Image (cartoon, helix red, strand yellow):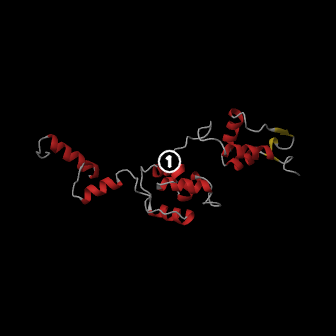
Amino acid sequence: MTDRHATVTSAEVAALLRVSISYVYRLRATDPRFPVPTASPRRGNEFVLADVRAYVADRRNRPPSAPGRRPRTLHHLRGPRTFAERLRASVFRGDGEPEFRTQRGLARRLGLSEASFGHRMRGRTRWGDGELTVISELLRLDTSDANAASVGSVESDERVLDGDRSRASRPAGESAVVDVQAHLGGAGVA
């Protein structure tokens, strides 16, 4: 069978695009460039493989602000700088295959929920040593700066080292007591 006559199902299209099947259905409904399915008596709607491959190539070559594509910043010109950018680029290149192909797959491999993985990628939560070891081994990434962007990681650590135990670096209970004492003019709390 030639490529022009080969057909694929929606699930196979999803695998080619590296998206979910529900997203394929959304593309069918919203993207006028998406290939038109052909009815198949044995498997329902199918797509001509050559048309799907042309669509995939067209999607990959879209300009940065084309519909359906996240706007690009200029970091793609200078290369990824932060750990999260390097991790995202590595997963996108397929460095984790065959174990995982997406950030969601990496999150599962690390035993993290998607929300927890997202918090780590945004620097809201620190990466665990075990997680960084797995990332380093699977993707061969330098993980030395992985926690540099974590909230309060650098600032709080520097304050404690300098002897400044300001509110940001104190335990929550201690903050409340010190704040009440300051409000009372330094008097002790009864």
Q: Amino acid at mark 1?
A: Ala
Q: Secondary structure at mark 1?
A: helix
- Along the horizontal axis of the image, is 169 left or right of 5? left
Q: Quadrant of residue 56?
A: top right
Direction front: furthest residue: 77
Q: Is residue 112 visible?
A: no
Residue located at (57% from left, 41% from top): 70
User: Which of the two residues, 62 or 69, is positioned nearer the viewer here?
Assistant: 62
Say how many tags the image has: 1
User: Which of the two residues, 76 or 159, is positioned nearer the viewer here?
Assistant: 76
Residue located at (15% from left, 44% from top): 181
The residue tagged 1 is 115
Direction right: furthest residue: 1
Residue 114 position, x and y percent, is 53, 49
Residue 22 position, x and y percent, is 67, 40
Residue 73 position, x and y percent, is 52, 44
Relative height, residue 107 to residue 69 (above, below): below
User: Which of the two residues, 82 or 135, is positioned nearer the viewer here?
Assistant: 82
Q: Is residue 116 visible?
A: yes
Relative height, residue 91 to residue 53 (above, below): below
Residue 9 position, x and y percent, is 78, 45
